[in-house]
């Protein structure tokens, strides 16, 4: 089955700790995205990547970091600098056309729910 | 950057009635407008999308209309069923932007 796999489903972070959320896709999509979802605030973009070894900050990148060493993988690290990390995190991917047009549907993973201990 | 406003934030209808959710966008260069449905505890999934070269698109009980002049687009669900209950998100993006901007979502409840 093709799709996006996020792990773990639930994650707990201690004060001062960095944690990494995994996102893997086997859809052969070029573009990948990380969103944070809080109640009543929709999907806010953290980071996105259109190609291996390149990524851009989204609207709320502070306190987060990413890497894109492989096309199928886009892990997100929530650092200790992120003071309010409790949220639902969604990873997504999409096709890019030859012209780099990002106007294609996004496919989402099942999400990771991060909480503070 | 792009700003997308979505209304209403909550919507309750009786089974069989129609539901309409509206989104407005700020960037006139935006040309792709998808709608996603997120059931409780599940991932968002695309239900319908529209590009700026058409004004309306329909798929069974779901339709989307686009008014480029007024910069708004709407989701129409007819003959609603309890399984339509979910959070619906609109989004907008423009060519080569590399990303989409999402609305804050509408929680639709269909009462049997």
Image: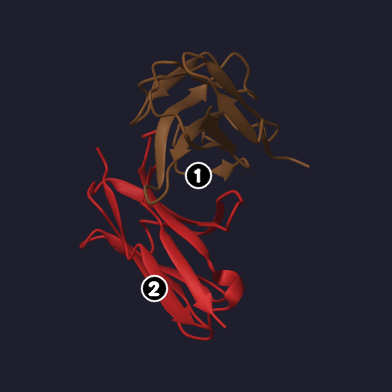
Chain colours: A brown, B red
Q: CA distance from mark 1 to mark 2?
A: 24 Å
Hey, which residue is sitting farthest right in the picture?
A1
Is residue A34 visible in the rendered image? The answer is yes
* B2 to A19, vertically: above or below: below
Mark 1 crowd level (few <14, some 14–19, many ≥20, 10 Å Cα): many
Q: Residue, x 47% and y 13% (percent of image)? A: A16
Secondary element type, mark 1: loop
Query: Quadrant of the rendered structure where residue A103 is?
Result: top left
Residue B76, position as x, y percentages in the image: 43, 73
Instruction: Please state which of the two labelled residues, at mark 1 or mark 2, is closer to the viewer.
Output: 2
Mark 2 crowd level (few <14, some 14–19, many ≥20, 10 Å Cα): some
Q: On what subunit does the disc labeled 1 rest?
A: A
For label 1, the residue is A104
Q: Residue, x 27% and y 42% (percent of image)? A: B2
In the picture provided, is A21 more to the left or to the right than A84? right
* A70 to B32, vertically: above or below: above
Q: Residue, x 31% and y 47% (percent of image)? A: B30
Split into 4 quadrants, where in the image is the N terminus of chain B?
top left
In the picture provided, is A101 more to the left or to the right than A93? left
Split into 4 quadrants, where in the image is the C terminus of chain B?
bottom right
Secondary element type, mark 2: strand
For label 2, the residue is B20
- Nearer-the-camera pick, A63 or B19: A63
Residue A94, position as x, y percentages in the image: 55, 38
Marks counted in the figure total: 2
* A44 to A52, vertically: above or below: below
Q: Residue, x 39% and y 73% (percent of image)? A: B20
- Nearer-the-camera pick, A16 or B96: A16
- Nearer-the-camera pick, B45 or B70: B45
Query: Quadrant of the rendered structure where residue B34 is?
Result: bottom left
Residue B8, position as x, y percentages in the image: 33, 66
């Amino acid at each position: 089955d093709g799709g996006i796999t996020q792990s773990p489903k639930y994650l707990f972070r201690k004060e001062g700790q960095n944690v990494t959320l995994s996102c893997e896709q086997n859809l052969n999509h070029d573009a990948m995205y990380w969103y944070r979802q809080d109640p009543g605030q929709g999907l806010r973009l953290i980071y996105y990547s259109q190609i291996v070894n390149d990524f851009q900050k989204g609207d709320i990148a502070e306190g987060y970091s990413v890497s894109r060493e492989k096309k199928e993988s886009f892990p997100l690290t929530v650092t200790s600098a992120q003071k309010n990390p409790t949220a639902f995190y969604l990873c997504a991917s999409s096709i890019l056309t030859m012209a780099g047009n990002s106007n294609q549907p996004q496919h989402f993973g099942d999400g990771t729910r991060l909480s503070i201990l | 950057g792009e700003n997308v406003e979505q209304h209403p934030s909550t919507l309750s209808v009786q089974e069989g009635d129609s539901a309409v959710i509206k989104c407005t966008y700020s960037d006139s260069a935006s040309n792709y407008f998808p709608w996603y449905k997120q059931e409780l505890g599940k991932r968002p999934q695309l239900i319908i999308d529209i590009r700026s070269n058409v004004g309306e698109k329909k798929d069974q009980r779901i339709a989307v209309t686009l008014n480029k002049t007024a910069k708004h687009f709407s989701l129409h669900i007819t003959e609603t069923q309890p399984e339509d209950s979910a959070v619906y998100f609109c989004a907008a993006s423009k060519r080569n932007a590399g990303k989409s901007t999402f609305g804050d979502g509408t929680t639709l409840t269909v009462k049997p």
